Image (spheres, grey):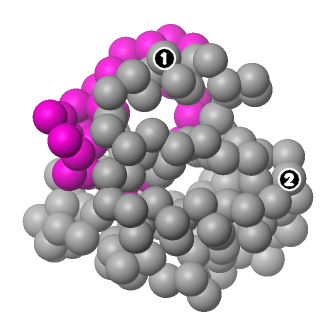
Amino acid sequence: MVSTVEIDFTKYHALAVEDDAGGMAIIGVMMRYLGMKSFMNTSGQGVVELALAMKPRPDIIFLDLNLPKTTGYEVLRQIRAEERLKKVLVVAVTAQDADTEIPKCMAAGFDGFIGKPISRSRFPRQIRRLLSGEPVWETY
């Protein structure tokens, strides 16, 4: 089901955690295009601190599963352990095999899954659905 809910993206804040320059560029361009305030982190280190420092705090975090020196699963665990971030949507973004990773992401407590490569045409709809409370577990 595709959401027909109108979202004023300018009222939302996002944090993207992505070590791949191409993936970061696409997410960054899409956030700016939609008018969302966004912050970027390229390593996974300090994500909780950055999210807590954001004013206002992020509404959604796009989290790559493969990060230098850590994994998206570990960063998610840290986010979920922080009381002030418990309600933030956290979406896995990865090029890993969706058949393997989607069940793992669901079990770990992610709020959604978007497979790479990110589709420039579908990404705005995926964000709209997520912010409207609809699940997004898609391979592309």
10 Å crowding of disc 2: few (<14), some (14-19), many (20+): few
**Residue tagged 1:** 49
Instruction: Determine the residue located farthest toward the top in the rendered image.
Output: 83
How far apart marks 1 and 2 lie (CA) works out to 23 Å
- Counting from the top left corner in percent of width and height, residue 139 is at 33, 78
Kind of residue indicated by mark 2: Thr
User: Badge 1: how crowded within 10 Å, few (<14), some, or many (20+)?
Assistant: few
Q: Is residue 122 above or below residue 63?
A: below
Relative placement, left or right, of 128 versus 49 is right
Name the residue beneath numbered marker 2: 10
Residue found farthest to the front: 21
Q: Please state which amino acid type lies under the numbered disc 1.
A: Glu
Identify the secondary structure beneath mark 1: helix
The C terminus lies in quadrant: bottom left
- Quarter of the image containing the N terminus? bottom right
Q: Is residue 91 above or below residue 98?
A: above
First in sequence: mark 1 vs mark 2 = 2
Read off the magenta span: 64-93
